């Protein structure tokens, strides 16, 4: 054997090098999601590692038997590690990772261990005790990663960790303490309960590093903890996301006391276990959230199935309903049942509360309504029966229900209604162009089992509208804390009639979104609209809309008007498009002035409708901005070399339209009425 002073001479021997390489590669992949390979003098250099071709610099370092610090190329970091200077051998380790972390020391340790493992002396002695211990601890890191990837429940993972650590340390017991300020729980390898685990957590919290028995003994004796009498104790903090989540510790070494290597090992293990526990808790919370999300989706589907598949078709009336829960499931709902008269009985109800409890009660109210409506013709009588039947369940749940029931009388275009503490119904009187409110006629369901209710008879004239809604509509809140209110809801109806009921409901919903200005829906929204058809409208087509008072939104209105060109009653396609373009231009100029002068940069919305009649186009625009009148100045020639600074757009509007009216309405609203006559256009 050659003698080389100061060097350990290493020879290749018949050891299971490839088995070691395989385990190291698995561990490296688990730690970094990268690749690793061992290169020896006798074996060929790999061409690629886990699908990544070796860069030229890596191949050069292997050929020249040199070390290559992290070398970055194409999003990969490469290392080539040779044995330490006091070792002689031809074992090199090449590895890559997607992140440039401090892996060099770990790779150097592995390379030296492989070099020693291949030495003649190590094989002859079946490896030294230190090497066995080092290899066992290396195996522990690999197994720890394996446990984290396969344990499905946190208690199982903690138990596996303490039993695994007990196999590689010389201690009578290993323990883990986890939890939070509300309480701490322990798990031990021996199965014996750990006394007063909170004492260990409280004392290590202020230090943040491993502590031995000497540093902990005073605190343990102060509370008479049996741990003060053990042979030796070593405890390290578990840190997860920069917060203390528990401790890990060793108790009673089998020989002497715990040394610096035990401290180093436990500190390393504690850091990894803290992260694993935090990841396991996050995974459990994520899985629980996904489970709840799935259950809520199922519940939402069940709740949606309780709604009527279709609404009854009634001669002379339009009937439309809409529901949007603030969450997956909610307490607002509507329903339709056949009354004793054979005519429809409508109900819109709001169960106090949100989420699952409210959703369960809605199913009970649904069933009660459908079961009893068939035997009743009077809404007040039906509410009284429902109140008596539902009171025991609502009292147990400490809840109540507001509801309004409508009995439609299609032969007279009228209805009777009764309201159990529900929000006022809105009744639009088309002939007088006014909004009436229909208030409650009794207490909410579930308050008093002996409550009585009264019905009121209401007639509908052509063009009249009855709107039932939940308080999620009128209590919609904007970023300034203001609520839409009954006045805001009335404004929408004024601006959108006499459009079809479906179009009006659509604009109400869009207006709520515009009003909230990006805020999430805080309460369920339920709507039912009954509209009496009006033959006197001459078959005009009405297209309502709502816009935020922002200049970019004008494009939406322009597109709406232009897309209506095919509905303009003119024979020439080109002329229809030209009229639509001119009308869109005129409206956009008026809306621009509304936004700039009526709102003065403040948030708001513009409501309106486009009406296409047999001989005219009409636009009605409504806003709640400051008063602003159309200038009365006549149309005058404009010098293109010296155009006026202001008013040019409005002068253009006068040239495009036949009538322009603007007026200030009550309750602080502006109304613009724009008309384009079609007679003689061609």
Image: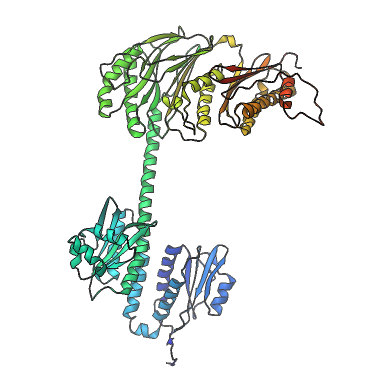
Snapshot quadrant of residue 648: top right
Check the image and report above or below for 589 versus 227: above
Snapshot quadrant of residue 680: top right
Q: Could you tell me if residue 545 is visible in this image?
A: no
Residue 262 percent across, percent down from the top left: 31, 71
Q: Nearer the viewer, residue 49 or 600?
A: 600
- Is residue 157 found left or right of 32 in the rendered image? left
Q: Residue at x 36, y 59 (%)?
A: 239
Snapshot quadrant of residue 640: top right
Check the image and report above or below for 436 versus 53: above
Q: Could you tell me if residue 633 is visible in this image?
A: yes
Q: Nearer the viewer, residue 354 or 490?
A: 490
Q: Nearer the viewer, residue 239 or 357?
A: 239
Residue 36 percent across, percent down from the top left: 47, 69
The residue sitting at the top extreme is 412
Residue 257 percent across, percent down from the top left: 25, 74
């Amino acid at each position: 054997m050659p003698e080389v002073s100061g060097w350990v001479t290493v020879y290749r021997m018949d050891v299971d090098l490839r088995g070691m390489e395989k385990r190291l590669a698995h561990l490296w992949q688990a730690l970094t999601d990268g690749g690793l390979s061992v290169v020896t003098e006798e074996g060929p250099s790999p061409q690629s590692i886990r699908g990544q071709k070796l860069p030229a610099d890596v191949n050069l370092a292997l050929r020249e038997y040199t070390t290559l610090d992290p070398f970055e190329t194409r999003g990969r970091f490469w290392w080539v590690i040779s044995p330490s200077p006091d070792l002689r051998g031809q074992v090199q380790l090449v590895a890559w990772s997607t992140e440039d972390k401090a892996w060099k020391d770990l790779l150097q340790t592995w390379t030296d261990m492989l070099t020693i493992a291949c030495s003649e002396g190590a094989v002859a002695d079946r490896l030294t005790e230190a090497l066995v211990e080092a290899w066992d601890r290396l195996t522990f890191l690999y197994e720890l990663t394996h446990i984290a990837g396969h344990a499905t429940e946190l208690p199982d993972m903690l138990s596996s960790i303490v039993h695994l650590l007990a196999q590689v340390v010389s201690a009578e017991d290993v323990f883990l303490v986890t939890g939070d300020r509300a309480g701490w729980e322990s798990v031990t390898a021996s199965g014996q309960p750990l006394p007063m685990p909170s004492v260990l957590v409280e004392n290590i919290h202020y230090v943040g590093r491993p502590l031995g028995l000497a540093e902990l003994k005073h605190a343990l004796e102060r509370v008479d903890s049996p741990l003060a009498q053990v042979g030796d104790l070593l405890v390290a903090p578990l840190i997860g996301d920069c917060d203390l989540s528990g401790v890990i510790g060793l108790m009673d070494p089998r020989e002497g006391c715990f040394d610096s290597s035990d401290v180093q090992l436990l500190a390393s293990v504690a850091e990894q276990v803290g992260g694993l526990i935090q990841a396991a808790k996050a995974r459990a919370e994520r899985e629980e959230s996904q489970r709840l999300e799935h259950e809520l989706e199922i519940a939402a589907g069940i709740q949606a199935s309780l709604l009527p598949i279709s609404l009854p078709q009634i001669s002379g009336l339009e009937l439309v309903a809409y529901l949007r829960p603030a969450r997956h499931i909610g307490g607002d709902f509507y329903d339709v049942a056949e009354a004793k008269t054979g005519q429809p009985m409508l109900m819109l109800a709001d169960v106090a509360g949100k989420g699952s409890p409210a959703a369960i009660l809605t199913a009970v109210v649904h069933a009660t309504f459908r079961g009893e409506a068939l035997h009743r013709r009077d809404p007040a009588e039906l509410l009284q029966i429902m109140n008596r039947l539902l009171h025991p369940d609502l009292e147990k749940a400490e809840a109540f229900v507001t509801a309004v029931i409508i009995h439609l009388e299609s032969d007279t275009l009228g209805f009777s209604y009764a309201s159990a503490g529900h929000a006022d119904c809105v009744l639009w009187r088309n002939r007088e162009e006014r909004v009436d409110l229909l208030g409650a006629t009794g207490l909410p369901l579930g308050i008093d089992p002996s409550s009585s209710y009264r019905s009121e008879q209401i007639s509908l004239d052509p063009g009249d509208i009855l709107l039932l809604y939940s308080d999620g509509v009128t209590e919609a809140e904007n970023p300034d804390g203001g609520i839409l209110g009954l006045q805001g809801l009335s404004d929408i109806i004024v601006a959108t009639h006499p459009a079809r009921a479906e179009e009006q409901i659509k604009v109400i919903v869009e207006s709520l979104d515009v009003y909230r200005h990006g805020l999430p829906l805080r309460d369920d929204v339920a709507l039912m609209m009954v509209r009496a058809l009006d033959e006197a409208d001459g078959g005009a087509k009405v297209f309502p809309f709502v816009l935020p008072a922002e200049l970019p939104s004008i494009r939406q209105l322009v597109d709406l008007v232009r897309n209506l060109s095919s509905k303009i009653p003119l024979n020439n396609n080109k002329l229809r498009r030209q009229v639509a373009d001119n009308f869109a231009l005129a409206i956009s100029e008026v809306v621009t002035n509304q936004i700039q002068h009526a709102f003065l940069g403040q948030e708001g919305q513009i409501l309106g409708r486009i009406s296409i009649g047999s001989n005219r186009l009409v636009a009605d625009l409504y806003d709640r901005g400051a008063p602003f009148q159309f200038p009365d100045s006549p149309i005058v020639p404009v010098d293109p070399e010296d155009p006026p600074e202001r008013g040019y757009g409005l002068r253009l509007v006068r040239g495009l339209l036949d009538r322009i009216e603007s007026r200030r309405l009550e309750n602080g609203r502006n109304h613009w009425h724009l008309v384009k006559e079609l007679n003689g256009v061609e």
